[in-house]
Amino acid sequence: MTIALDVQHLAKSYGKKQAVKDVSFQIQEGEIFGLMGMNGAGKTTILRMLATLLKPDSGDALIDGNSIVKHPEKVRACISYLPDEAGAYKTMTGKNYLAFIAGLYFKDQQEQKNCITLGEEICGLGDALGQKINTYSRGMTRKLVLARTVMIKPKLAILDEPTSGLDVLNSLDIRKTIRKCAETYGTAFLLSSHHMLEVSTTANRCAIMKDGMFLAEGSPQELLVKYQAESLEEAFEKAVKSS
């Protein structure tokens, strides 16, 4: 399979605090990789470096063969990034918002039209796309911004806490959408989450983080076996307490 993301010894410090320490991992095309860790574990710092919002102190990462250090402009052309508190322009309708995003990425009118159609399909908001975004619930807004993140068919979609603050049904919808996009379009996903259930039911592989380092990496099932645990929560607890 094709490697979409190759992270090579990434490190980042804020003053004297080392937020990320020599992290390396890979994600294949169409694979979903989850980062699990408590607040301050270094998850968001990794995501921001890969999104070229932060420059690493050392190490590098190749996204579709492009270096985040040497060629950040090429990286930005093949990724999409959804921050934890991402919003949308509230005075726009949902449809106009998708059209605006499509126009940023594609010059050709037909490509824009195809992108918008895909965004409408992915978000599943139907007639609500004709309404202004300031009338949307949090769940509807999250579905819209997830759609704009993946409708451009990036090589890598970076999602920070994609279901944060959502109820059970909306969370399930978001997870199903992520899995479908990975399978259908071959998009690689890197997501961070506090919710172990989300990772165990969505990700193909995952990593447990603490103090900027990977404590363990593998499929959810492999981590259950490694830590002789009945749930990913229990595996996470054992990994963190034994480190």
Image (cartoon, helix red, strand yellow):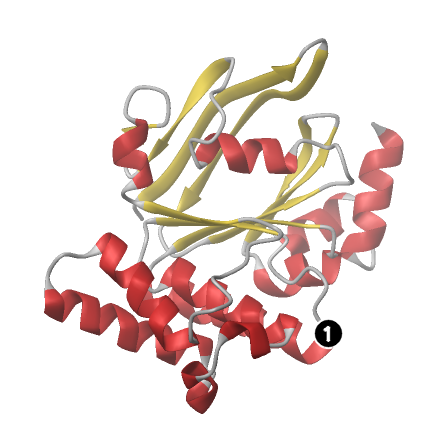
Residue at image location 32% in from the left, 39% down from the top: 76
Q: Is residue 169 above or below residue 110?
A: below
Q: Is residue 39 above or below residue 181?
A: above
Q: Is residue 13 visible?
A: yes
Left or right: residue 54 compared with residue 79: right
Instruction: Please state which of residues 146 and 223 is positioned toward the viewer in this rendering.
Output: 146
Looking at the image, the residue that sits furthest to the top is 16
Q: Is residue 128 above or below residue 60?
A: below
Residue 178 percent across, percent down from the top left: 49, 65
Q: Residues within 10 Å of mark 1 (few under 14, many from 20)?
A: few
Quarter of the image containing the C terminus?
top right
Instruction: Please state which of residues 138 and 211 is positioned toward the viewer in this rendering.
Output: 138
Looking at the image, the residue that sits furthest to the front is 91
What residue is shown with label 1? 167
Left or right: residue 60 compared with residue 118: right
Residue kind at label 1, given as amino acid type:
Asp
Residue at image location 80% in from the left, 48% down from the top: 235
Secondary structure beneath disc 1? loop
